Image (cartoon, grey):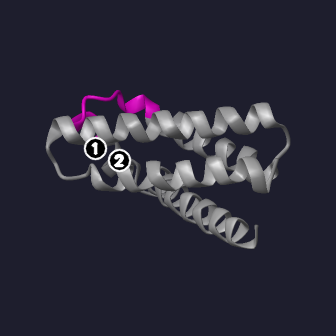
Amino acid sequence: MKARKITYWIATGILTAIMLFSIQMYFLNYETVQGFFEALDYPKYLVYPLAIAKILGLVAIWGNFSKWLKEWAYAGFFFDFVLAFTAHWVAKDGGHILPIVAIVVLMISYFLGKTVRP
């Protein structure tokens, strides 16, 4: 059980680091991210709402307030990563590796979290 807890916290920490990097990019480098969104054919007005949704998702996961809310946070991150992977894959810009890593880390955090932090 101790190895599961350690693995869960490491995976959740990595997931958090990925999300915090993304969030800070969205707020501090808005023009750059806006250009990425436009290049991937996403509307640029999604940058700030997506950053706020990522913050709320991290609060839901770390806060462990309700199972329902935590499930939706993990689902939202999953959809975000799948869409990021698909957009980068279609654009053929080589940016599809990080979403794959994020999906793997997300799955580890999600499934171990069900036993470690019910």
* Residue under the image location 61 percent in, 65 percent down: 13
Compare residues 112 and 41 and report the one nearer the observer: 112
Compare residues 104 and 2 and report the one nearer the observer: 2
* Residue under the image location 45 percent in, 48 percent down: 103
* Residue under the image location 27 percent in, 49 percent down: 96
Does 106 appear above or below 69? below
Compare residues 112 and 68 and report the one nearer the observer: 112
Q: Position of residue 28 (x, y in %)?
A: 47, 57
* Element carrying mark 1: helix
Does 93 appear above or below 45? below
Does 15 appear above or below 80? below
Residues marked 1 and 2 touching at CB (< 8 Å): yes
* Element carrying mark 2: helix
* Residue under the image location 56 percent in, 54 percent down: 108
Q: Position of residue 53 (x, y in %)?
A: 60, 38
Q: Which residue is mark 2?
A: 33
- Sort mark 2 into few (<14), some (14-19) or many (20+) by Cα contacts within 10 Å: some
Q: Which residues are magenta?
A: 35-46
Q: Label 2 amino acid?
A: Val
Q: Tell me, yes or no, whether the highlighted magenta stretch contains residue 44.
A: yes
Query: Which secondary structure class fits the magenta region best?
Result: helix
Q: How many marks?
A: 2
